[in-house]
Image: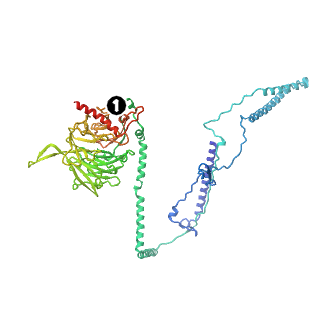
Amino acid sequence: MPHCWTFKYFLFFAISLASGRMVNERDEDSGTEVGEGTDEWAQSKATVKPPDQLELTDAELKEEFTRILTANNPHAPQNIVRYSFKEGTYKLIGFVDQLAVHFTQVGNLIPKDSDEGRRQHYRDELAAGSQESAKLVISETEILEEEEEPKEAEAGSQTDVPIVEASQKVAEEELMTPKQPKERKLTNKFNFSERASQTFNNPLRDRECQMEPPPRTNFSATANQWEIYDAYMEELEKQEKTKEKEKTKTPVAKKMGKMAMRKMTSLESQSDDITKVTQAAKIVERMVNQNTYDDVAQDFKYYEDAADEYRDQEGTLLPLWKFQNDKAKRLAVTALFWNPKYNDLFAVGHGSYDFMKQSRGMLLLYSMKNPSFPEYVFSSESGIMCLDMHVDHPYLVVVGHYDGNVAIYNLKKPQSQPSFRSSAKSGKHTDPVWQVRWQKDDMDHNLNFFSVSSDGRIVSWTLVKSELVHTDVIKLKVEGRTTEDLEGLQIHTVGCGTAFDFHREIDYLFLVGTEEGKIYKCSKAYSSQFLDTYDAHNMAVDAVSWNPYHAKVFMSCSSDWTVKIWDHTIKTPMFIYDLNSAVGDVAWAPYSSTVFAAVTTNGRTHVFDLSINKYEAICNQPVVAKKKNKLTHVQFNPIHPIIIVGDDRGQVTCLKLSPNLRKMPKEKKGQEVQKGPAVEIAKLDKLLNLVREVKTKT
């Protein structure tokens, strides 16, 4: 097989060499013909068009005609119909055999193991044996004749008989003795080819055609001033004629011409527009990132910490992706929020908690499908301190700025500026806005949200047409603290709001945390007084959050190193946890009523499960590499078992919870595991009842 190919390649190379020589010889011949006359080469030659040549436009010349070679048999029928007894109808057969057979031959080979093959083999051996014995007899007789020549006279004719008898005996003995079969060489399994299996290779052929060059004629002329002048005058006459034709056109024809020109310009602009490939570029970028972060994606889907089987009450956090943008490196993560519709998309607000170094702010939206670059980027002059995304309209993002303004960004619009923004005229806050939350639409179906600020105001903002209309819901006043002004009037000390959260079942009920460490239970219906007051912490309240399952339970954290769990009907906390560092944020887990996470300024993440351990965290793990980095916010994904953690260097880390951190109730033999909100409420109630009994005894 290899020799056959080398011969074909050699033949092809020889043919190509010969054709190249022929072309060179033709060129040389043509060159000698041109160079015969010394005057002809100096003069330019113009091509002469034949009379029957077609005149084609540029579009027709550029048009390509493609021919596709297929392996389909053109003679194979395409409309074979068979009757289906199962369905009782005639059906068209879709698959048609495209194989064309050019040559067939019936073989006459007989297997060796068959009876006929053995008989033929035996006959061949007998024939071969008889020939060899005859040769041996002839050779022996010659030798004997040579040796016994001097004894011919003595022995006479008596010697002929024993020689013939001896030769016959030797032949019979050779036939009777069994012959050993010859060793047959085994075929090489690694470099073996059989002729019967080789396909026929069509010989290579070159098809060439030679055409005559187009005829040419010599042309020469002189250009004088009067000839140039006449040419210009002809061009001017043509332009004047075209102007006269345009004047005689109707207005409708002029409009049609202008519209055609506009369409042409719009098509040209569209052809140069890069935005056409943005969607394709985004898909390609995600594909490249999926290959780059393939190991992390596999861990996110399938990895489970096997060591959890040997740890009863402890778990770990597996680091997955890190989200960071170069423009937001020096800005702290001031807000995190998962999109309520797209579970892989989350928003990050960037600002600064250092009030002496306030600069700009950024709003970034990342997707877990592309950790290298954010999906949306918005920048602002003032730092963003909080954000929230609408449940029914997930493309609307409301943010609160350090300068007291609130703004709404629309992700559907490519503009970098917010769609709505407050101002001094519309009643903006005078201090930083620490929390914003979307609310249900009002009676007129207008979008509205609430905001809380250090100026002590809780404001309701409503989107009316293209404006933000504000209404002061409540003003925070510190009870028992008053100051006197110059005229001796008593003025209540204003409380500085830092965080708030609305009840998930009772629409009018919400909690407000302040810098003084107090938590106020408020109602939207009452603006003059609080429903209740809790002396919660000794320092500023950083976060307040209602339990997603239990209607009475909420949680708070503070810079005084503590996390407290409350029953809003009782003024004292049910659980208190000291984390040995200022707590930046807390968040309830969406899959369990007893699991929550907290982040501290020493770079650690704490995960608690009250049903497993009521006294300490089941996971206490450092997240950031540098000890100087402070963790600011934490959020659970609503579906996947992951959390995102932000720090003060603008970096967001995605972590996966190990199986011990998301334990589900064990199945008992013969009983189904009960799941749902009722089970989660009962599980938390059981823990609260134990604490209540201890408190009543004390």
Q: Secondary structure at mark 1?
A: loop
Q: Quadrant of residue 510?
A: top left
Q: Quadrant of residue 539?
A: top left
Q: Is residue 370 visible?
A: yes
Q: Relative to residue 320, is residue 388 depicted above or below?
A: below
Residue at image location 42% in from the left, 44% down from the top: 290
Residue 9 point in image, percent of width and height = 61, 47
User: Residue at the top extreme?
Assistant: 154
Q: Which residue position holds label 1?
A: 313
Q: Quadrant of residue 663?
A: top left
Residue in front for this viewpoint, 46 or 606:
606
Q: Relative to residue 173, is residue 485 depicted above or below?
A: below
The quarter of the image holding the N terminus is: top right
User: Residue at the left extreme?
Assistant: 487
Q: Relative to residue 174, is residue 245 depicted above or below?
A: below
Q: Which class describes the residues within 10 Å of circle 1: few (<14), some (14-19), or many (20+)?
A: some
Q: Relative to residue 20, is residue 57 depicted above or below?
A: below
Residue 315 point in image, percent of width and height = 35, 33
The quarter of the image holding the C terminus is: top left
Residue 645 point in image, percent of width and height = 32, 41
Q: Is residue 623 visible?
A: no
The amino acid marked with disc number 1 is Gln
Q: Give the left or right position of residue 140, taking residue 342 as reference.
A: right
